[in-house]
Image: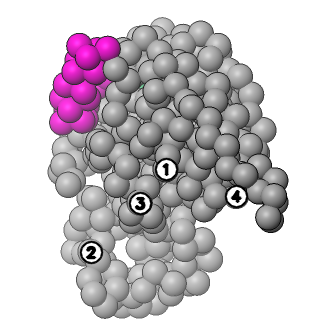
Amino acid sequence: MAIKRSSSQQKSERLPRQKGKRKPTEVKAKSPNSEENILVSTEIVEDLENNNEDKIRPHRLVDYIGQKDLKAVLQIAIAAAQQRQEQLDHILLYGPPGLGKTTMSLILASEMGVNCKITAAPALERPRDIIGLLVNLKPKDILFIDEIHRLNRITEELLYPAMEDGRLDVTIGKGQAAKIRTIPLAPFTLMGATTKIGSLTSPLRDRFGLIQRLQFYYVDELTEIILRSASILKLEIEQEGAEEIARRSRGTPRIANRLLRRVRDYAQVKQQTVITQPLAGEALDIHNVDARGLDWTDRLVLSTMIDQFQGGPVGLEAIAAATGEDKKTIEEVYEPYLLQIGFINRTTRGRVVTDKAYEHLKTVDS
Ligand code: ADE
């Protein structure tokens, strides 16, 4: 089956609700949430700055669209912690990338009136990396660790007493002369984020008081997010234009905002002042994003499964080898959305392409 970009448009559909190493250096970044106290790995700074992400991020819970259940849980946690004048319990957020885990940690810090230090597990290479972060926390501060499933064993073990008893047990010296020194810490909240909750060790997982999953967003929620972002970016957009972008955003706000910027570029170059549905469709067609948000690689995965494996069942390794894509990327980036929209199923014998996917590919194939 040939892979071809598509300009076909589909009826608006709500998504069903679903149940390389980073640079170790850390730098300070400005953020409206907590002045300059957000400590982030360089990659996140780049993300915040290059994409102007910070400008369109919601800063308060009331401005955060979607994730109703998560917001309800966090609202109670915030109110309870504030009434007791305590820090929030440790929170673990999991789910596919781009759904707003970092944004939520910044919002929680705003709501609690505390600082949020942001880092990622690959940046915490040496014991002194995590020790430096922990000892500098002020009472009730939030420490956000992205990709927490990638912590090394020593760092993870330093976190256990820190999370449980607010202390660090640091070994000083080596061999016979080694001594353990205990450093008391300010009461803090650890926010862990992961796309792979199954890869967390149970001792670490069990130390989180709240474990919450972020869901893919509904098309109407993404539409609202796009309208909000467009207004912040001072773009004129019609409701149908926003819906067109939302349908192609794979249930993911980060993608929705990225596509909005591509449509903005297109409108600017074509000297159009209003983003309409046809304009949004044209703009995204040239980026190979089809009516369901599938890109070239999604369609390659599906067509490879069909052409080389008769639609499955086929194992992840075989799909990766046949497409030349990284196995992890397929598993963590492409597969969750294809499963979510029911284009593939997972069986005990492997992945299978569904009738729905065949129907969709017909609309994008000549
Ligand atoms: N921008 C990105 N994610 C958002 C959300 N959940 N609500 C509002 N704006 C957003």
Q: Nearer the viewer, mark 2 or mark 4?
A: 4
Q: Position of residue 135 (x, y in %)?
A: 64, 30
Q: Secondary structure at mark 4?
A: loop
| Contact check, label 3 and label 1, Cβ < 8 Å | yes
Numbered mark located on residue 20 in the image: 4
Residue found 70% across the figure and 34% down from its top: 132
- Which residue bears the numbered disc 3? 203
Q: Nearer the viewer, residue 227 or 326?
A: 326
Q: Secondary structure at mark 2?
A: strand
| Alpha carbon distance from label 3 to label 4 | 26 Å
Q: Answer above or below: position of 183 versus 75.
A: below
Tell me: 294 left or right of 342: right
Q: Is residue 77 magenta?
A: yes
Q: Which residues are magenta?
A: 63-85
> Who comes first in sequence, dot 3 or dot 4?
4
Q: Position of residue 323 (x, y in %)?
A: 56, 77
| Alpha carbon distance from label 2 to label 4 | 29 Å
> Who comes first in sequence, dot 3 or dot 1?
1
Residue found 46% across the figure and 28% down from its top: 188
Q: Nearer the viewer, mark 2 or mark 1?
A: 1
